[in-house]
Amino acid sequence: MRRIVTANLNGIRSAAKKGFYAWLEHQDADVVCLQELKAQAPDISLEMLNPPGFTGYFHYAGKKGYSGVGLYSKRQPDQIIEGLGIPDIDAEGRYIEAVFDNLSVVSLYLPSGSSGEERQAAKFSFMERFLPRLEALAASEREVILCGDWNIAHTEKDLKNWKGNRNNSGFLPEERAWLGDLFSRLGWVDVYRSLYPGHEGEGYTWWSNRGQAWAKNVGWRIDYQIATRLIAATARSASVYKAERFSDHAPLTVEYEIEW
């Protein structure tokens, strides 16, 4: 059995102060995918760089205090692929891939478009240019687990207030259709939803800081582990950790029955 965790930290230094690494020490995770580091290499402490038992790998954004992804692994990867090879996307630090034999684990941070039309356009541009990589990965003979903050709630059961968000970024018809295409045409599997097709409200991973969204569980399920079919079929359980708050997101853990 192998445990994979994904967590948007909304600032790695902030999450560290809120106890993320104390929690991580007891998770028995094999790979941990991080998003929204909001830090550069000089900002990373030894605890953040290599937590006990792990080696860390990072893809920082060029802009200080912005974006960035990372990955911790207990096993030494055969290869680390940093970025997509698209300069403007890679400048925002949104993709890092660890290669282990026939398995790749990716930490992904898809842009948010909630701040305005310009960022929504950037999000659509990312989706369009990221699609060929998703198609290539799906067509390869490799097994892949794409972990991260996708900033899209796929269906009505994936956010509490779906009626009020039909025209908002993260639940736009074009975004939902794009994600649906990955599942239907390309055969990617939404691992949490495949395990728990009827769970509504239990899989939320993000809550607005406005009002009492957290207290009332007015959340969104926008953090996923999306996998190729064979490895998705080995998933045995998935859980969202909400006993503590390290960020406005909550960590998502999946247990897979795989050997490596």
Image: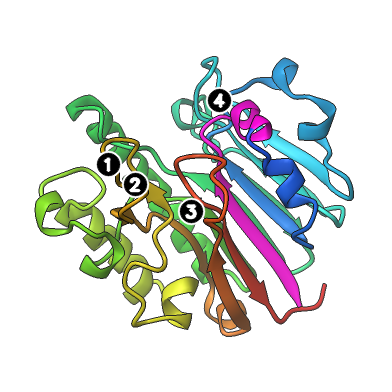
Whether residue 4 is visible: yes
Real-space Cα separation, disc 2 to disc 4, in angstroms:
22 Å
Which three-letter amino acid code belongs to the residue tagged 4? Answer: Lys
Residue for point 59% across, 82% down: 230
Q: Badge 4, how many Cα within 10 Å: few under 14, some, many 20+?
A: many
Looking at marks 3 and 2 on the same chain, the residue that comes earlier in the sequence is marked by 2
First in residue order: circle 4 vs circle 3: 4
Task: Say which element carries label 2.
Answer: helix
Front one among 137 and 40? 40
**Disc nearer the start of the sequence (3/1):** 1
Where residue 133 is drawn, which disc sits there? Answer: 3
Secondary element at tag 4: loop
Label 4 sits on residue: 38
Viewer-nearest residue: 247 or 222: 247
Looking at the rendered structure, the kind of residue marked 1 is: Phe
Colour basis: rainbow
Q: Quadrant of residue 111?
A: top left
Q: Which residue is mark 1?
A: 124
Q: Which residue is mark 2?
A: 127
Labelled pair 2, 1 in contact (Cβ < 8 Å): yes
Please report the bounds of the magenta region as a residue range.
1-17
